[in-house]
Image (tube, rainbow, N blue to C red):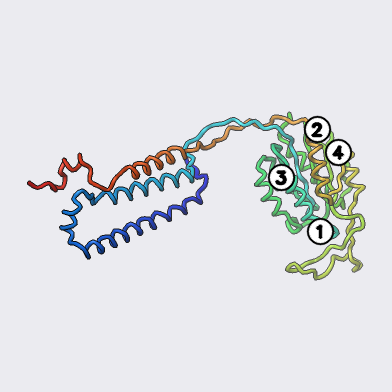
Amino acid sequence: MYQLDAPTYFYVFAILPVLWTGFLWISSWKKKTQRQFASSKLMDVLSSQRSRFKPLLKLILISLGISCLILGLINPKIGTQLETVKREGIDIVFAIDVSKSMLAEDIAPNRIEKAKRLVSALLNQLASDRVGIIAYAAQAVPQLPITTDYGAAKMFLQALNTDMLSSQGTAIDAAIDLAATYFDDQDQTNRVVFILSDGEDHSENALAAAERAKDLGIKIFTFGVGTEKGAPIPIKKNGIVESYKKDENGEVVMTKRNTEMLISIANSTEGSFVEGNDTQAVLEFVSETLKQMEKKEFEAKKFVSYKDRFQPFLIAGFLLLLIEILLFETKTKWILRLNLFNENKN
């Protein structure tokens, strides 16, 4: 197994064809120029100590030296090294409202996008906590099981939209009950559910579900998005508002944030309600709240890391270039004595 630390340096290898092309052009130019003054036989007599293959050998040494230096910059990581990583954190489940009321634009760009951005910002400041994601409207569906993979969490988060559930409504109780099944560690002392919603609950069982969660040691924190003044629910086509959702009497439906419901749910589990429209306030609150919670060592994971192998390439590169510098283009005496090419004629 191997891994390349900086593969972009592969582009530097383009210097080698340029180097060889320049060498061939200069060699050809030298031969043509020399022929203007003397024949090849006469040149051999006049410069009898000139080596024919050493210029090529020096070029090969330069090419190999540069190649080794480039490989050193690329830093191939070869081999494996086992390390033990211990994590301490809290289990957090994000329950995100994806009902149609979350399309209201009383908070920019709309409620559901605001909720998704809040979760993304919270994920950015988490370190070793485990997270899970639930989407809910008239029913709750799991999106991401409890995990430490924040990259996967962001990917699933971006896929949330108000069209993912055919049945509409807002059943917070279903989201709470589903969140309770996410906590797979019986020894985890702190279990947290973050509900991001406008609080428009179309079920009467939310407080009962919150009481059941409290009995399981779960704390619920609610983050209200939207305004109590409310806004209509736009119906868009290709990003353009065509109309607004209407009730049975043909009147435009105004969806308002139900702050009292969100506060009641949070208080039932000794949690807190937070104004979700202020991102910075949410981040500061969550940061301080998690700091005060006892963290549990929930994972001791062994993983493979690669060892840096750039050192041999750099050493080889500098040695090859040093040899090239010390190598003269004249014939080497001990090779000359061997008379490999039958050059010494009696």
* Residue located 86% across and 45% down the image: 274
Question: CA–CA distance between discs 3 and 1?
Answer: 21 Å
Identify residue for label 3.
124
Name which residue type carries label 1.
Ala
The mark that comes first in sequence, 4 or 2, is 4
Could you tell whether 69 is left or right of 124 in the image? left
The mark that comes first in sequence, 2 or 1, is 1
* Residue located 19% across and 57% down the image: 43
- Disc 4: CA contacts within 10 A as few (<14), some (14-19) or many (>=20): many
Residue 77 visible somewhere in the drawing? yes
Identify residue for label 1.
108
Question: CA–CA distance between discs 3 and 2?
Answer: 19 Å
Name which residue type carries label 2.
Gln
* Residue located 24% across and 47% down the image: 330
Question: Up-down: is 88 above or below 51?
Answer: above
Question: CA–CA distance between discs 4 and 2?
Answer: 13 Å
Question: CA–CA distance between discs 2 and 1?
Answer: 32 Å
- Disc 2: CA contacts within 10 A as few (<14), some (14-19) or many (>=20): few
- Disc 1: CA contacts within 10 A as few (<14), some (14-19) or many (>=20): few
Question: CA–CA distance between discs 4 and 1?
Answer: 27 Å
List x then y, in percent, for residue 342.
Answer: 13, 47
List x then y, in percent, for residue 286.
Answer: 80, 41
Q: Nearer the viewer, residue 130 or 138?
A: 130
Q: Nearer the viewer, residue 50 or 139?
A: 50
The mark that comes first in sequence, 4 or 1, is 1
Identify residue for label 2.
292
Identify residue for label 4.
271
Question: Helix, strand or loop at disc 1?
Answer: loop
Q: Nearer the viewer, residue 137 or 130?
A: 130
- Disc 3: CA contacts within 10 A as few (<14), some (14-19) or many (>=20): few
Residue 4 — which label?
A: none
Residue 139 visible somewhere in the drawing? no
